Image (cartoon, rainbow, N blue to C red):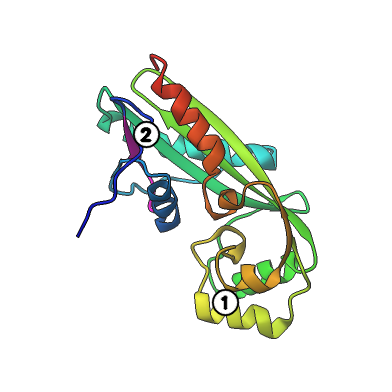
Amino acid sequence: MEETSKFNILGNKKLVLGSASPRRRELIAGLGLEVRLLEPIEVDESFPARMRPEDVPVYVSQKKAHPYQALLGADDILLTADTVVINRGEVVGKPHDRREALAMLRNLSARTHHVVTGVTLSTLRRQLSFSATTEVEFAELMPEEIEYYVDTYRPYDKAGAYGIQEWIGQVGIKSIRGDFYNVMGLPLRELYEHLRRISVKHY
């Protein structure tokens, strides 16, 4: 089987992904970059109660980077990220069970919310963090549609209890403003630009 070639924008640097998210792994692979996967490390994802909702993803992405620092080589660029849904000024995380997932989707139905992903890029010498926001509007979701989606797709690993690339995104999303891939877990265009800049600097 012929191996797919990689598009190298990193020079001698190597991208390292500190994430258990299969979607982030797929998105990075789609950029055509070589990436080394690290074993997932459990991190406390709590945040200060008074923190602005839009600041939470960067804060958590920095917390996720911390335990990996000792594992980095001289040419490594560590990528950690966190995605949250913000609905009516409140952070919506991942549902713990079916009841929470149903409630989250009922609250998103016929409303506009924001998806914010925070990204942290770390080397042995420096750390760079940024975030991207995408506005998503759901059409009105029928109770049976919500139940079908939750029972079929079990979105317990997804912020806001939905995956935009799945059935609920195909039939339920009315409009989107911003980076589509950001809703999946990584703002690819902005990430690509930051990686390209890092590759030409002594970072």
Looking at this rendering, what residue extends furthest in the bottom direction?
144
Res. 193 in view: yes
The residue identified by callout 2 is 78
Identify the residue at image location x=56%, y=51%: 181
Q: In this view, does 156 lie above or below 75?
A: below
Q: In this view, does 55 lie above or below 100?
A: above
Q: What residue type is labelled 1?
A: Val
Judge left or right: residue 70 versus residue 198: left
Identify the residue at image location x=49%, y=62%: 157
Q: Distance between the residues labelled 2 and 1?
A: 33 Å
Span shown in magenta: 14-20
Q: In this view, does 78 lie above or below 94?
A: above
Q: Residues within 10 Å of mark 2 (few under 14, many from 20)?
A: many
Disc on res. 41: none
| Image quadrant in which the C terminus is located | top left
Foreground pick, 96 / 21: 21
Q: Residues within 10 Å of mark 1 (few under 14, many from 20)?
A: many
Res. 59 in view: no
Q: Which amino acid does label 2 sit on?
A: Leu
